Amino acid sequence: LPCWTSLFIFVFVAHFLAGVLHIQITLSHFSMKTYHGHPMDAFKDSEFLLSQLATTMDIECHPWLDFIHGGLQFQIEHHLFPRLPRHRLREAKAKIQALCKKHNVPYRSKTFYEANLEIIEQLKETALKAQCISPLIWDG
């Protein structure tokens, strides 16, 4: 880059955008269950749909904020239909929610604030579980 100012602006913008991406993915995945099983088992019967619904959640936001989130607030829809264009994800969300309601399948969706609280609780729970192995790691 031609000067220090341009370099600083580039690094700041890159880190800001990566931070937004990281927050969005963290909120949609970290507090959810982890899939334990053979990867191909998820494609049997209805297991794929159920595994995607169990391991990710959506973040609720106003349609005007879709551009800022870049479609990442629709993680369930993205996992079910990875090639679906971002501008169709909100429409797919309504259809998937209706399908889940019809079959009494849980569909997880939280506000940005609620998702952050859930992540903090999950991190606290993980830290408490890790206390029992902490001496093995840090005391040599």
Image (cartoon, rainbow, N blue to C red):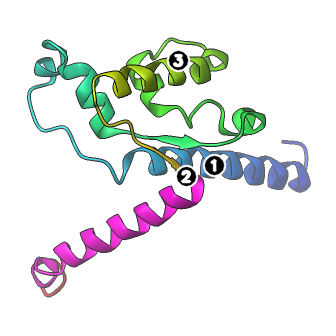
Describe residue 52's horizontal placement relative to residue 36 as left or right: right
Q: Earlier in the sequence, mark 1 or mark 3?
A: 1
Residue located beneath label 1 in the image? 20
Q: For the residue marked with disc 2, what is the amino acid?
A: Ile
**Residue 96 appears at what percent x and percent y?**
43, 21
The quadrant in which residue 43 appears is top left
Identity of the residue drawn at 39% across and 45% down: 29
Q: Earlier in the sequence, mark 2 or mark 3?
A: 2
Q: Which residue is mark 3?
A: 92
Which segment is the magenta one?
111-136
Q: Disc 2, disc 3: CB below 8 Å?
A: no
Corner quadrant of residue 120:
bottom left
Residue at 19% from the left image edge and 37% from the top image edge: 35
Observer-side mark, 2 or 3, equals 3
Total numbered badges shown on the rendered structure: 3
Tag 2 and tag 1, C-beta contact below 8 Å: yes
Disc 3 residue crowd, few under 14, some 14–19, many 20+, Cα 10 Å: some
Q: Position of residue 32 (x, y in %)?
A: 31, 48
Tell me the residue that label 2 is attached to. 23
Residue sitting at 90 percent across and 43 percent down? 2
Determine the CA span between mark 2 and mark 1: 5 Å
* Vertical relation: 18 (above or below) 105: below
Judge left or right: residue 11 versus residue 120.
right
Q: Is residue 50 above or below residue 29?
A: above
Residue 109 point in image, percent of width and height = 47, 43
- Left or right: 11, with 49 as reference point: right
Label 3 residue SS: helix
